[in-house]
Amino acid sequence: MKRRFFLIALTIACVLFICSCDLSSLAPQQGETTAVTDAESSTVVDIETTVETEKTDVLDTTVESDTTVESDTTVESDTTVESDTAVESDTAVESDTAVESDTMVESDTTVEPDTTVESDTTVEPDTTVEPDTTAEPDTTVEPDTTAEPDTTSEPDTTVEPEPDLPKEVTAYGKTTISGTPLHIYELMETHILADTPAETIEFDESLNITLNDLSIAKTIFLSDHPECFWWLGGGTYAVRDEVIKAFYPQYLFELEDIASKKNEFDAAVEAIIKDVPEGSAFEKALYFHDKLASMVVYQTSENDQTSYGALVQGKAVCNGYSTAYQLLLMKAGIQAWTVNGYSRNIPHAWTVVWLDDETCVYTDVTWDDQDNLGVVLRHYFNMGLDEIDDDHIVNQTFILPECDHNNEGYYDVINANVYDTDGIEKVVKLFGKQENGQRTANFYYEGNDFRQWFSQNSEDLSNALGLRSLAYSIIGKEVTIIASDE
């Protein structure tokens, strides 16, 4: 039978997402509008296509700044700054080379499927316990002998409690696939996560592995393993009669450099993990969310799609933010998973977080990191599926977990959701202590028109606080009011 060999281009970087979220600085001035950029630009690489670059607005971000000055109970409003989103395009070119060769050496050997890989979460309990009572009792009693009491001290068997360790987390995505994609996934765990990653992964041709099988396995594998920063899914494959017989991963670093990169990466992770607060999963997740948003700049770079780019180099786009957040959570024993899809028709990535066995939430650190405004938002922290579904659509490859939100959003937990019908009493309680003549309140406005609410309540709010001037800003629906005595 005549045989043919082809080495065909594989551009399977299904999770290459380059999100543009550049924000111009917020500088409210009288009669001037400041443009605020909050656009995501990412890359979707289809199996048989080249890199696509998207350009479009993502977030309808409104930034307002109003100043209310009370003078003899007359409240004046000075400035209002409206901001529309600007668009910047970030182009990431992930090229998988297309090579056709007639000189490949045919291998007559059949590679058996590697079925020995076990999940890292499978732990066989040690149920074999040797009893300590096997000694035969001494029943011989010497006559006319007074038995001496047994004064032999028993060893101290008190077990010192071990320090609380992060609970073991599982690779959730792996539980959602089966059959051939699962087999490929396990081969990737064996060969790509190895101390020295493999240059070739061979498949059993009898399994009839297709491009779709490979694509599914790769997508789920990368979503489960945020620590795999040296590979983003690129590579080439060999095919015979439309059946893939081997895959050749293309890594972001030279093989001999990956070990040192891992050491550098582990040190950066440890520096963050050591300061994680004790407390609930909510508190730890909020710490990682704010820490990541404060230390990472949204910027395209050589490794911007990876957790390495975010945690070591401090530069990342959406997939870098998401996988870094996922990794930190998992190191703290909190189950997490990166998913990708679209936000308003733009490719994007974000994170699923399990706060406990019954509660899972969705967090988009990228959108909460507003660098150019100098703020870290919490709107996209711990959202429910019904909330994030308003502007996030997950790819069909991902099977989302069935769990509840249980009011674990940031503003839900701190009871800082304000409605049209709320008076000033609730808002007054949200103001912090006065520092340098100012007090600040942050909350999420659930109503329809904050401007109207502020117009109706600003005078009473100023009187209640005992401060003359009120200024507010709105990003999305997150409101900040600053009250001062000037």
Image (cartoon, helix red, strand yellow):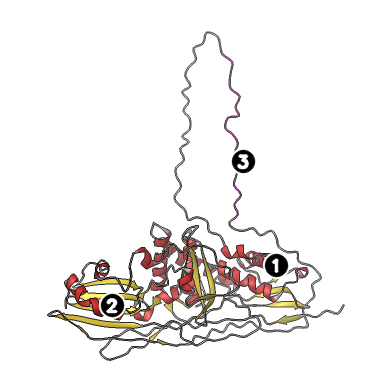
Where, by quadrant of the figure, is residue 210 drawn?
Answer: bottom right
Q: Magenta residues?
A: 122-141
Q: Residue at x 62, y 65 (%)?
A: 189
Q: Nearer the viewer, mark 2 or mark 3?
A: 2
Residue 194 visible in the shown view: no
Question: Label 2 to label 3, Cα distance in Å?
Answer: 69 Å
Q: Residue at x 44, y 62 (%)?
A: 406
Q: Residue furthest left?
A: 72
User: Would you say the residues marked 2 and 3 are in contact, meaning their CB atoms lie under 8 Å apart?
Assistant: no
Residue 453, disc: 2
Residue 178 x/y as whole percent: 67, 64
Question: Label 3 to label 1, Cα distance in Å?
Answer: 36 Å
Q: How many marks?
A: 3
Where, by quadrant of the figure, is residue 485 drawn?
Answer: bottom left
Q: Nearer the viewer, mark 1 or mark 2?
A: 2
Depth order, front residue of 214/6? 214
The question of residue 6 being in magenta is answered with: no
Kindly identify which residue carries mark 1.
180
Depth order, front residue of 484/167? 484
Residue 128, disc: 3
Quadrant into which the C terminus falls: bottom left
Tag 1: residue type? Thr
Q: Residue furthest right?
A: 1
Question: Label 1 to label 2, Cα distance in Å?
Answer: 58 Å
Dot 2 surroundings within 10 Å: few (below 14), some, or many (20 or more)? Answer: some
Depth order, front residue of 87/263? 87
Residue 196 x/y as whole percent: 61, 67
Quadrant into which the N terminus falls: bottom right
The question of residue 125 being in magenta is answered with: yes
